[in-house]
Image: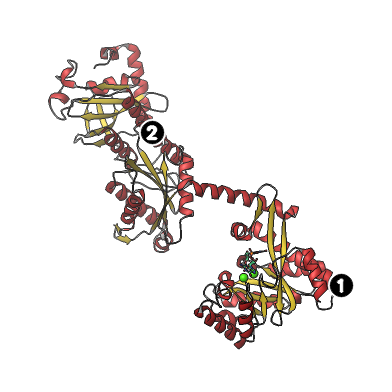
Amino acid sequence: MTDPQNPKAALSSDSIADEKLRLAELAVLDILDTGPEERFDRVTRLAAKIFDVPTALISFIDHDRQWFKARLGLELCETARGNPFCRHTLNHALVFRVEDTAADPAFRDNSLVTGYPHIRFYAGRAIRGPTGQAVGALCIIDYKPRTFDDRAQDILIELGALVEAELMRRPDWPRGAGHSIGEPGRPDPTGVVGHHDLIHAHVDRLLAIAAKVNHRLAILHLRLDNLPEFKLVYDAGQTQRFINRWLEDLQDKNTDLIYIARLSEMALLGVLDLADRVDDIRRRCDALRAQAIQTADINDITFVFNTTAGVSLFPDHASSAQELINNARLAHARRRPGDTTALFTPLMAERSQRQSLLQERFMRAVVNDALHFCWQPIFGNFGRTLVGFELLARWYDPQLGAIGPEEFIPLIDQQERLKRALVVKAIDTACRQLARWQTRHSEPPHIAINIPGSEFYREDFPDLVSSILGDHGVAGNRLILELTERSLIPDFEATAQTMRRLRQTGIHIAIDDFGSGYSSIAYLTELPISSVKIDKSVVQQIDRAAQRYRLMQSIVDLAHGQNLPTVAEGVETPAQLQLVTDMRCEYTQGFLLGRPQPLKQTDALVDRSM
Ligand code: C2E
Ligand code: CA
Ligand code: CA
């Protein structure tokens, strides 16, 4: 087919004025004779792949020549402007196409048809500059005739829009300096760190194209886990250059990796074209990751990147770049320990929504008393004498129902503000109750409070505790702060110092969940603690597994060696109570002797027992 417009119209005076405008716009873009750039090469690769053609080109049309910015499958850098293909393309509103040049009298004698590169099929879409002037063309070429339907036309139009978007990302970028991902204000082949709008817009365009060709895409959130190690040795400039080269290499070796951008310092966004292969996406990602971790040896720097990935699929999981990128990030964050690649599942999104909701509502719950505490009794004298209680947080939300601490504690641990609110509420609740008991009992029960390690290590923590004690006029010697061994930092001196400051107010420290993790003896020998709580996973197995029995016995002996009393937690059966008693474990806590209960029952129990 040929263009309905008469090419000779280009000679009218209007057209001459237009041509001046067009060349002015091209000059402003300042793109002619610049070096190849990945961000344009990527589009030609994509076009060649989608249409399955040997040649795809991005050209800009100067007054006397057609110059190629990106060329796949063509040896020439430029051709004479006079060639009718580009002339027609520039003048065409949509896509100009010639399905078989040999059958078209306007083209069959053209030198580009009769000689190199022997064009039999051509389809081109004009590329417009910021003010709408047609400055260049994106075209695909084949050496055999082809048909080109409306759907194909739409795809080429979209691809052209990708090129135009890249053009808009200039014009005052320095050039010739190679690619510089992440350098502030500099262009790069794969997106500038933090320029999420541009990255999202680009991915959205890829999605639009993929939807048209019915391709599935995988969106990868790829994390460079050991980048900090690299940065210890190399400066920012070297780091950027190295990563840029590494990314280009990765793209060169993987034609299905149609886009890669740096989302943040440590995170990359990749788009994989899965075409119609849907199975084994995880294996494909792992293969890519395996390549990614191959030693990169660039500019005499050798480094192995360790990566982990989260993956979401288009169109399966979402239809927008924003959602897909979020989903991939979520999959990464939620991957199981030891997993290097995790595929997004809708369940992850549900969970994440619930988590955000809980985090949102928690503060209100603290203020409105929707969050309260249950009191679980602790007994001495082999289960016969009440000695204290552990405060255990409970949350009842009018809409969501009861939410257990196993669910909400890990969530609030992620936010300082929430963690602190709970700690303050727990200490305040304990002190208020102690003040009441003091008026009725000369020896009120102890109250144990769970303290997250990160709160404990805050500079102002001992002062916070002292001030709450002061508010209620109680001494610290009835309070026990429970710290899990997992939450203690390896710096014994810092830990011991905080503990000593707290000990000055009479407060006791207990190591919680002992036996569930590292069970370091050093915790017992080097820290000024007052007691050891043995984890219920140990206690509940002592009547069933000989090895647990021996572990329990050795923990008790070890503690006693340091003059530390022990608490057996989670005692549920008379057999367990008998065994811990035989081991001379001083205190017991568990459903057998008392469940966590509301304050009213707690008060009654104290009045009965003390
Ligand atoms: P934890 O500190 O080890 O608390 C003991 C847990 O064991 C409590 O679960 C308690 O109900 C449960 N338990 C006690 N006796 C038995 C028993 O005989 N059998 C069984 N199966 N379980 C028993 P809960 O209340 O669900 O608390 C779970 C965890 O949540 C606590 O473990 C603690 O780590 C955390 N937590 C609870 N309240 C608070 C709080 O106020 N602040 C902080 N930071 N963490 C809290
Ligand atoms: Ca505890
Ligand atoms: Ca415990």
Classify 10 Å Cα crowding around label 1: few (below 14), some (14-19), many (20 and above). few
In the rendered view, does 375 fall on the left or right side of 221? right
**As rendered, which of 297 and 121 lies closer to the eye?**
121
In the rendered structure, find residue 211 and report the number of the disc placed on it.
Answer: 2
Q: Earlier in the sequence, mark 1 or mark 2?
A: 2
| Rendered view: 401 above or below 25 | below
Q: Of residues 212 and 386, which is closer to you in this image?
A: 386
Residue 494: x %, y % from top left: 60, 75
Query: Mark 1 — residue?
Result: 439
- Say what secondary structure mark 1 lies in: helix
Given the image, on which type of amino acid does mark 2 rest? Ala
* Gap between marks 1 and 2 measured at Cα: 74 Å
The amino acid marked with disc number 1 is Thr
Q: Is residue 293 left or right of residue 448?
A: left
Q: Residue at x 31, y 50 (%)?
A: 250
Residue 127 location, quadrant: top left
In front here: 335 or 497? Answer: 335
Quarter of the image with the N terminus in it: top left
- Left or right: where does residue 263 sit relative to residue 571? left
User: Residue, x 63% and y 74% (percent of image)?
Assistant: 571
Q: Determine if residue 529 is in view.
A: no
Q: Position of residue 425 (x, y in %)?
A: 73, 61
